[in-house]
Image (tube, rainbow, N blue to C red):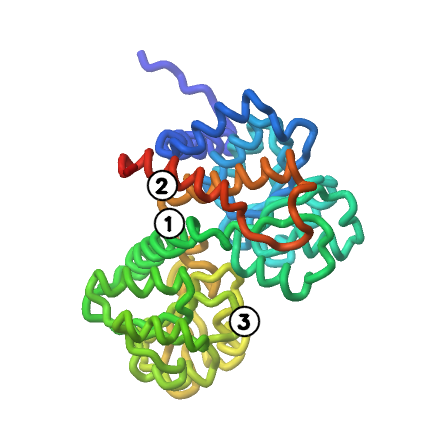
Amino acid sequence: MNAERTPVTAESDLAARGAARIEWIRSRMPLLAAARAELASSRPFEGHRIGMSLHIEPKTAVLLETLAAGGAEVVGTGNHGSTQDDVVAFLQGQGMTIFGSRDDTLEQHHENVAGVLDAAPDMLLDNGGDLAAGVVARGVTGSILGGTEETTSGGDRLRGELSGAVPFPMIVINDSLLKAIGENKHAVGQSVVESFMRITNLMVPGRRFVVLGYGWCGRGVAHYLRALGGKVAVVEIDELKAFEAALDGFRVSTAVDLAPWGEVFITATGHANVLTMEAVERMTDGAVLANCGHFPWEIDVESLRAAAVTTREVDEAIERIELPNGRHVVLLAGGRMFNLAGREPKGNSLESMDLGFLLQTLSLERVATAAASLTPGAQPVPDDIDRTIARRMLAAMNAAA
């Protein structure tokens, strides 16, 4: 006789699915495993509440477990469009206060960020500068010990619109050369190409790609596309980066000039409206538009939809937009970061995020234990942390000299 299955709620089913995925990923992140053991002994985050705004996916859960092992109370939310509901359910089941779901609108996302700030964290784990900007807007900067910022986009905000307004240290993880090489160039490059193939089911070899931006992420995307046989051109307004792209063998020009040539356009700049309607109107029929930058503003989606004759959702990650000139373009993931907000999101590789999240962990530990030794505002990861993690990563790869 078959045993009768005990009824479970949808929420518990969701959490169980998240737990199963996280178990596999936890087993492949040895750097964070070692850090969890160390932090469980030293407890540097005891008495601290860390407010988080970060993509919520299984690798992030392992980071949060690591911080909790060090004594932290975590209150967090995901980023717009990239939250994975089974991971949220798992983390909530572990007693963490986590806001947000995959279907949240941008307005709901902003409400989630406000919910994190309402919990009065004294440390920040930020992604895109949303929490830091919120703290400044609320006038509660004096209650913050310090924190970390994951992205170049957030670092630009800290050094731009928030310059001089943040009196506490914010360590910008993307300033780390270690992260730039390991996560941005190689992991983003791999995950963007993988996501393009998975979402569209289109072939890379022989296809013409235009990569907008030749920072570390753009470099990785361009090189991985070419490694799989893609024909790649680069758009870059910085003369030195454009020079590098040319010497790396890529065609270099403007988005408008490359529009009739390209078949797929991928933005990786961190800046708004770099792919404009002027370029879109010159594209071939069926051109694919995708963004891998943090904010969903690099493609001028608002103008694109305003100009559309009709739009049709092919599936959750593919939108067909008919234009007045009789052509159509295909928009992936609504212009959001398509390697995390698209269908079957995997994001960056486990090894790269093991490295990147150890940078987060040790940088937050530095803030918790020695904030007075750091300067106010945006700053790079301390050199000794970079070098410690490089040695640990080499050992984990069995590549140590």
Residue at 59%, 47% (x, y): give it: 148
Q: Earlier in the sequence, mark 2 or mark 3?
A: 3
Distance from disc 3 to disc 1, alpha carbons, whole Å, reads 26 Å
Residue at 43%, 28% (x, y): give it: 33
Distance from disc 2 to disc 1, alpha carbons, whole Å, reads 9 Å
Figure check: 34 above or below 232: above
Q: Nearer the viewer, residue 191 or 48?
A: 48
Residue beneath label 3, please? 272
Left or right: 258 as drawn, with respect to 360: left
User: What secondary structure is found at the residue carrying circle 2?
Assistant: helix
User: What secondary structure is found at the residue carrying circle 1?
Assistant: helix
- CB of mark 2 within 8 Å of CB of mark 3? no
Q: Residues within 10 Å of mark 2 (few under 14, many from 20)?
A: many
Report the quarter where the N terminus lies. Answer: top left
Instruction: Kindly tell me whether residue 251 is visible in this rendering.
Output: yes
Residue beneath label 1, please? 182
Q: Nearer the viewer, mark 2 or mark 1?
A: 1
Q: Amino acid at mark 2?
A: Glu
Q: Quadrant of residue 70?
A: top right
User: What secondary structure is found at the residue carrying circle 3?
Assistant: loop
Q: Amino acid at mark 1?
A: Gly
Please state the horizontal and vertical placement of residue 359, each as a whole percent of the image: 49, 42
Q: Nearer the viewer, residue 65 or 336?
A: 65
Please state the horizontal and vertical placement of residue 165, each as a whole percent of the image: 74, 58
